[in-house]
Image: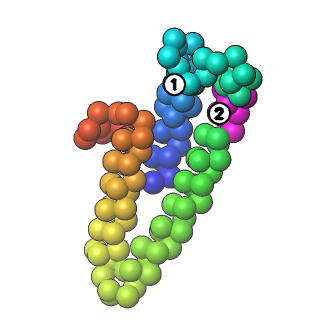
Amino acid sequence: MLTSVLYKAPIMLYKGWVRLAYDLMGKEAPFSKPFCVPFAGLFILLWPVVVSVVAFAGTVSSFFLGCYAAAVAYQENSTKRGLLYVIAAISLFHEYTNDFLYLREGSYFP
């Protein structure tokens, strides 16, 4: 999951900037009001910080996911079940992030 988080962070950065720019420049965009423009600029400037925090949280949570998989493998007395748990958790994470990033379904992007 660690590599998946690190590979998808640049895509999230790019797509977030594109969406924020579209919201700032569109005719019926949420940031089209004059008093919202400074907030849009702030969001655009702080978006790399948000992506960095998300990547760090994904990295930290992958460590705890591995620890939990080790506990599952120990309790079940089966390494195979622990590995299957890790694969299932990574595939769920992969599909959720693909939905969030609007990538096509079944994408093999790590």
Q: Position of residue 47 (x, y in %)?
A: 65, 33
Label 1: state its secondary structure: helix
**Closer to the camera in the image, 14 or 68:** 14
Where does the magenta region start and end?
A: 42-49
> Can residue 78 be seen by looking at this rendering?
yes
**What residue is at 68 percent from the left and 24 percent from the top?**
36
Q: Tell me the chief SS of the magenta region.
A: helix
Q: Position of residue 103 (x, y in %)?
A: 35, 33
Splitting the image into 4 quarters, where does residue 104 fall?
top left
Residue 23 among those drawn in magenta: no
Could you tell whether 21 is left or right of 79 in the image?
A: right
Label 2: state its secondary structure: helix
Q: Earlier in the sequence, mark 2 or mark 1?
A: 1
Residue topped by disc 2: 47
Residue topped by disc 1: 19
> Can residue 45 be seen by looking at this rendering?
no
- The label nearer to you, 2 versus 1, is 1
Q: Amino acid at mark 1?
A: Arg
